[in-house]
């Protein structure tokens, strides 16, 4: 049977039927990836998704963090991807990093905007900013935001360490909201890399790279410039991923270290290791 | 390899009002109309979104605008302040690209970030960073749009006015434009839009459905432009000329529409003085002077006059400007504005004359202008000027009569 690229079945799952893992990157439209050989020379942006979907089974849509999701372009984009292909969609920054009193209207627009990819939606990624700590006001805001996202699959990524407590995980579990597992530099104050499962339907992993010096540089080219070694990825396959796969029926893994096409290269490297383990 | 172009368009909506609101925070709570005050026939220079919603438009008579929006604060235009704010925005944009094109204190900027991804990262991130820096540093909040050309970027930013952002992915241009009204396409004249509506062509998609040959019949030489625009094709470059090579462009808007020759000539003299000083500061000479007359009925006429040698002297610039004005001022309709553009610039020769005694007159003029430039740079632009300027402005400042 032909295997879909970027999709692997690992042993585990809550009912022991296995865990389907989808591999991809955060964003796919990078001119730099042409320079670095992931896309063939001369590739235009319009054909990138088609080429990307030959290697991966999912993508995390980044651009909807910069601007509000709009139905027409998303429908046109979805039409370019094969039927089996899945999307995760970042929540727009006006509801996470630049919140204001209009956020409920923004959320409504967002929900309307992502309608064309609903059937192929893995999760809405709520990435919260580093200064979003666990205060009463922020807890209330997050609860209201998650209420507003009800009915959609949701994954929450914290960047502030104060959220790493059991009561938060329990509340996420009650809501069947996925806690995002991150791989990032070990810096004080950052949310730690945990293998906690809060939603048996889905685990969600983001590899940001471990560039300590660039992390707080405010320059994405420095922040996400990291190449995972074979050994670092092997350790993930030995330790955290089996643990996550054991308790969830599906999982997505996205590489965000997009600089110099390290993200797709590392994703393919991880896929190879996982395949060797699965077959071997 | 040719990269796809990546252009950012920034637009600070209602620029003059936005700048005034930074200076005076209390203006944020009420509608604002910027117009020359103290003149019965003054026209609106700019207005806030609230005033726009009340029906106020640029170029409308101030008395009419004031009736439509009675609660609006009325302020006189301060072009120097807007110029300074514009320079602040440009400074932020130039951190990311040398190719930055801008209008005349109108809050519009194009930044070509093609090929900068290795240095600064993905273009949406650059757009957001520039916007944040302008917001945090200057208190202005520009709209930004990202697209593969100027036309599409400009349309995209029109869609999100007064605040927001829009990203049009490369290859999406035609599909993006198709459902939009033809009036949103930049570069179309009112007459062309009306003509299209007569043919029941209301959307860009309908326009794109016509071939170049079909468009040729009603639109003649404009058919190629219309054909390309409707498909989101625009090959014009972001000129991004460094300031030293950019033409010198000055504008005067009359407090009230006029066809008074003395008033127009006085305004022209003032523009010549400004342009001449800028040329001398840059160490450049201009070989062509253009006059752009804007009439009260929105028509405009452009005419030029040129010289082989090039000049930075107010005296010769004035002669060229007078000649261009004579060629342009053909109608009896009153004038709303006057624009002077000095281009075909090159560096001023530092070679001395072989027979200086033949140049005695021009040397005297040069020394005089040098002295006036020094006074202006120390004490302000309006302190010293030629006789006509001062009498026309009636400012009561020191006047220096200079004979030609």
Image: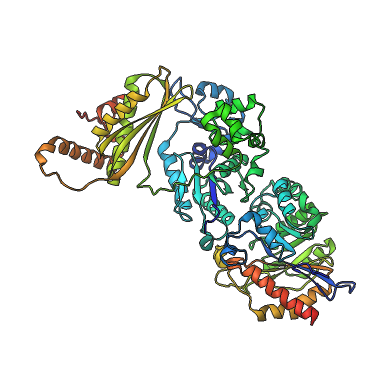
Q: Is residue B109 left or right of residue B182?
A: left
Work out which quarter of the rendered image holds the C terminus of chain B and state it: top left
**Residue at horizontal 44 percent and vertical 33 percent from the top:** B77
Please provide percent x and percent y for residue B98.
Answer: 44, 53
Instruction: Identify which residue, A113 or B380, lies in the foreground.
Output: A113
Location of residue B378 with respect to B60 vertically, above or below: below
Which residue is rendered at x = 58% and y = 73% of the image? Answer: A212
Task: Let me know if residue B360 appears in the view.
Answer: yes
Give the camera-side residue of B3 and B278: B3
* Residue A63: quadrant of the picture: bottom right
Judging from the image, the colouring scheme is: rainbow
Q: Residue A107: image x %, image y %?
A: 73, 49
* Relative vertical location of residue A164 with respect to residue B336 in this rendering, above or below: below
Q: For the image shown, how many numbered marks are present on the structure?
A: 0
Residue B56 visible somewhere in the drawing = no
Q: Position of residue B188 (x, y in %)?
A: 55, 32
In the figure, residue A254 lies in which quadrant?
bottom right
Give the image location of residue B32, x and y in percent: 54, 32
Between residue B167 and residue A209, name the one nearer to us: B167
Q: Residue furthest top?
A: B332
Is A139 rendered above or below residue B372? Answer: below
Looking at the image, the residue that sits furthest to the front is B213
């Amino acid at each position: 049977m032909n295997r879909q690229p970027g999709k692997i079945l690992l042993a585990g799952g809550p009912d022991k039927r296995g865990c389907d893992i989808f591999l991809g990157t955060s964003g796919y439209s990078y001119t730099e990836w042409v320079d670095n050989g992931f896309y063939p020379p001369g590739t235009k942006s319009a054909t990138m998704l088609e080429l990307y979907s030959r290697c991966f089974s999912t993508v995390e849509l980044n651009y909807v963090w910069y601007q509000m999701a709009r139905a027409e372009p998303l429908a046109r984009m979805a039409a370019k991807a094969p039927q089996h292909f899945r999307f995760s969609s970042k929540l727009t920054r006006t509801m996470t990093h630049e919140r204001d009193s209009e956020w409920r209207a923004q959320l409504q627009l967002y929900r309307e905007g992502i309608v064309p990819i609903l059937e192929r939606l893995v999760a809405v990624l709520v990435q919260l900013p580093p200064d979003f700590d666990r205060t009463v006001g922020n807890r209330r805001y997050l609860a209201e935001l998650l209420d507003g996202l009800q009915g959609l699959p949701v994954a929450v990524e914290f960047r502030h360490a104060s959220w790493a407590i059991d009561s938060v995980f329990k509340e996420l579990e009650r809501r069947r909201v996925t806690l995002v597992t991150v791989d990032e530099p070990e810096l004080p104050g950052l949310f730690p890399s945990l293998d906690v499962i809060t939603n048996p339907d889905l685990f969600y992993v983001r590899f940001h790279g471990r560039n300590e010096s660039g992390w707080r540089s405010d320059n994405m080219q420095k922040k996400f410039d990291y190449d995972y070694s074979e050994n670092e990825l092997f350790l993930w396959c030995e330790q955290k991923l089996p643990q996550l796969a054991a308790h969830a029926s599906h999982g997505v893994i996205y590489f965000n270290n997009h600089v110099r096409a390290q993200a797709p290269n590392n994703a393919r490297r991880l896929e190879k290791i996982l395949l060797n383990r699965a077959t071997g | 390899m040719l990269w796809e172009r990546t252009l950012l368009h920034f637009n600070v909506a209602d620029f003059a009002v936005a700048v005034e609101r930074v200076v005076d925070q209390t203006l944020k709570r009420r509608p604002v109309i910027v117009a020359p005050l103290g003149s019965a026939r003054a026209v609106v220079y700019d207005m806030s979104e609230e005033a726009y919603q009340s029906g106020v438009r640029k170029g409308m008579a101030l008395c009419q605008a004031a009736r439509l929006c009675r609660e609006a604060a009325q302020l006189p235009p301060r072009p120097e302040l807007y110029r300074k704010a514009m320079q602040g925005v440009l400074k932020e944009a130039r951190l990311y690209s040398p190719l930055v094109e801008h209008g005349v204190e109108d809050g519009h900027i194009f930044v070509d970030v093609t090929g900068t991804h290795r240095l600064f990262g993905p273009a949406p991130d650059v757009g957001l960073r520039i916007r944040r820096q302008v917001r945090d540093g200057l208190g202005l909040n520009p709209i930004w749009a990202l697209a593969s050309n100027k036309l599409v970027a400009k349309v995209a930013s029109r869609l999100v006015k007064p605040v927001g952002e829009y990203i049009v992915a490369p290859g999406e241009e035609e599909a993006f434009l198709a459902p939009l009204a033809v009036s949103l396409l930049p570069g179309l004249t009112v007459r062309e839009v009306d003509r299209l509506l007569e043919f029941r062509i209301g959307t860009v998609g309908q326009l794109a459905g016509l071939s170049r040959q079909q468009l040729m019949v009603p639109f003649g030489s404009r058919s190629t432009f219309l054909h390309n625009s409707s498909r989101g094709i625009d090959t014009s470059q972001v000129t991004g000329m460094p300031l030293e090579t950019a033409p010198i462009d000055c504008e005067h808007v009359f407090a009230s529409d006029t066809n008074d020759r003395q008033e127009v000539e006085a305004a022209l003299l003032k523009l010549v003085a400004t342009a001449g000083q800028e040329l001398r500061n840059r160490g450049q000479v201009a070989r062509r002077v253009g006059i752009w007359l804007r009439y009260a009925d929105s028509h405009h006429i452009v005419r030029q006059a040129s010289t082989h040698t090039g000049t930075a002297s107010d005296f010769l610039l004035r002669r060229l400007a007078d000649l261009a004005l004579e060629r342009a001022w053909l109608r009896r309709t009153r004038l709303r504005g006057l624009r002077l553009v000095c281009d075909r610039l090159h560096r001023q020769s530092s070679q001395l004359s072989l027979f200086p005694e033949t140049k005695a007159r021009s040397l005297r003029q040069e020394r005089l202008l040098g002295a006036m430039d020094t006074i202006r740079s120390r004490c302000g632009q309006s302190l010293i000027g030629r006789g006509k300027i001062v009498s026309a402005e009636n400012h009561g400042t020191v006047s220096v009569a200079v004979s030609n």
